[in-house]
Amino acid sequence: MTETEFKYGDSKWLDQPDHISKSQIKRDMLALQALGEELVALSPAARAKVPLDEELVDALQLADKLAKKREALRRHIQFIGRLMRTRDIEQIEQALAVMRNTKQAADKQFHKVEKWREKLLTNDDALTEFVAAYPAIEIQQLRLLIRQAKKEQEKAQPPKAFRELFQLIRPVIMENES
């Protein structure tokens, strides 16, 4: 092939199986940086559950100290991404996936409890439906809190009974889900 016949993408080195494009390298680098950002966002207690070596733990602790310095934190996250290039990140990703799923499950249960509370306050038939679904609930206490919460809403008072209703039904729903 002569120089005039050359077309973009027609290069002999692109056909080699071990070739990685510059764009792919950059995508991988940005993915590792995003993983680093996710690790920085975790609390120290949650981070302890992730299998990290000492150098990464030190880098993440330094990132916590740089939290208020935006540009320094951005550069440090790039550094964490660079450190992650030489690590086997499969175990880290698995640990983070477990944490994400745990949080999603907790959020789902929280929303379910909120929906039941709303339903109990707006629909009169919801009480019998709730008792049928969750027979372990203390019915008198439930009725009392529903009545008090409705009165609070009518009078625009602070939602004390509204919160107590949530606290009453949450453990019953969560226990039934487990």
Image (cartoon, rainbow, N blue to C red):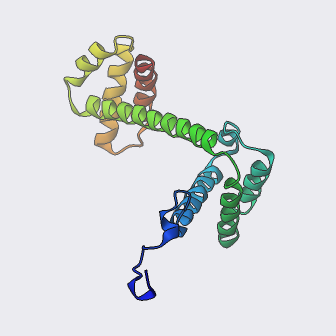
In the rendered image, the residue lying farthest to the bottom is 4
65 lies left or right of 110: right
Q: Nearer the viewer, residue 69 or 2?
A: 2
Residue at horizontal 41%, vertical 78%? 8
Name the quadrant of the C terminus. Answer: top left
83 lies left or right of 127: right
Residue 162: where, in percent of width, then height? 39, 35
Residue 136, image quadrant: top left
In the rendered image, the residue lying farthest to the top is 135
Residue 163, image quadrant: top left
131 lies left or right of 49: left
Residue 167: where, in percent of width, then height? 46, 28
Residue 128: where, in percent of width, then height? 23, 17
Q: How many discs mark residues in the rendered view? A: 0
Residue 62, image quadrant: bottom right
In the displayed structure, would residue 51 be above or below residue 71?
A: above
In the displayed structure, would residue 123 be above or below residue 50?
A: above
Q: Nearer the viewer, residue 1 or 172?
A: 1
Residue at horizontal 38%, vertical 14%? 137
In the displayed structure, would residue 78 be above or below residue 156?
A: below
Q: Nearer the viewer, residue 108 or 38?
A: 38
Residue 68 visible to the viewer: no
Residue 9: where, in percent of width, then height? 42, 73
In the displayed structure, would residue 59 be above or below residue 176?
A: below
60 lies left or right of 18: right
Residue at horizontal 72%, vertical 58%? 63
